[in-house]
Amino acid sequence: MPSRGMLSAPWLAILAVWAAGCSAQETDAAGHPLLLVIGRYSGGPNPFNPQTLILNLSSDTWYRGADRLHVGDHHTADVVANRLYVAGGFSDNANGKLQIYDPLTNTWSLGPPPPVNSGAAASAVIGRSIYYCGGVSNGNQQSGPPTPACARYDVDSGMWANISSMPYAVHHASGGSDGKRYFYVFGGRTASGNTPFGPVGYTQLYDTATDEWRADLPDLPVGRGGMGPAILLDGRFHIFSGEVRCGSPGIVCPNTATGLTSTGVYTRIDRYDPVSRAWDLAPPPGMAVPRHGMYPVLGPAPPTAPALSDRQVVA
């Protein structure tokens, strides 16, 4: 995403978009920050929706951009140099694709295919590289196993390179980075296919300088998947809401102690401090509307946002 030093009044948009869609922030030709929303399912007789919806955060107005080349869901979405890179996913042959959107020309193009062919992977940006890990192998929603495989995409060369695999194969995990050296993968699922079974709380850390992983860090306190990216804000990674399957082994819904609702989604927001290597909970009430399949984005608040403080979480 753009350098957060360039952003004023950071605002966290928690988006309930089309089924397992994604969002990212860019700017238009005038420098106005934009929030892009894409997904797949929008209801009605034709649920496979290729639309690119764009919110101008300066004017707080929506408009429609060019349609995507391949409709799908469970992509990763990362912004480097004001271009949106959408990798992998499920549906309409989105898996195995890298789709690139340029807001200045309002065009989508295809980049080189990722060497890791999956849906529901985790990703993050460090420098001018995108790190992509895990997911459901081959985008096979019925029976594809989780993969531990990882790759790095270099924006300048336009080339992918394989990197060391994760210690644990997961999908629907939460990816994040410190923007400098370390790529984190939090939680996720270990069951095959696009299912909410097998939630885990692993904290997996990749060192880009040594091409090595470690998985001996404190676990996410409540294992789950479907949280979207891990947002680094005020020195801590934030893990929002997420999902499990009620009635599966060890899962009883609701559970007020963990913030689990009767529908299998969480109200909790977990925070991880990479310096102290400790977890805590964000202050109550947590997620005002618990959900999964969202895509949190850090950016400037729209002018109509309530002036609660200079840092807000909006759901």
Image (cartoon, grey):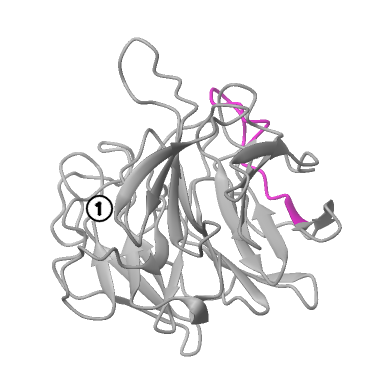
Picture quarter containing residue 241?
bottom left
Image-based side of 91 in relation to 206, left or right: left
Q: What stretch is highlighted in magenta?
A: 136-152
What residue sits 20% from the left and 39% below the top? 263
Q: Which of 119 and 49 is in front in this view?
A: 49
Does the magenta run of residues contain 192?
Answer: no
Q: Which of 102 and 104 is in front in this view?
A: 104
Residue 181 appears in the picture as rendered: yes
Q: Which of 241 and 153 is in front in this view?
A: 153
Picture quarter containing residue 33?
bottom left
What residue sits 45% from the left and 35% below the top? 39
Say what secondary structure mark 1 lies in. loop
Judging by the rendered image, the residue that carries numbered circle 1 is 266
In terms of secondary structure, what is the magenta stretch mainly? Answer: loop
Picture quarter containing residue 270?
bottom left
Q: Quadrant of the N terminus?
A: bottom right
Q: Quadrant of the C terminus?
A: bottom left
Counting from the top left corner in percent of width and height, residue 41 is at: 39, 26
What residue sits 74% from the left and 73% below the top? 208
Outermost residue to the front: 30
Counting from the top left corner in percent of width and height, residue 68 is at: 57, 31
Residue 24 drawn above or below residue 106: below
Residue 149 drawn above or below residue 93: below
Image-based side of 64 in relation to 164, left or right: left
Image-based side of 225 in relation to 160, left or right: left
Residue 262 drawn above or below residue 273: above
What residue sits 70% from the left and 37% below the top? 109
Outermost residue to the bottom: 276
Q: What residue type is labelled 1?
A: Tyr
Residue 198 appears in the picture as rendered: no
Total numbered circles: 1
Q: Nearer the viewer, residue 234 or 312?
A: 312
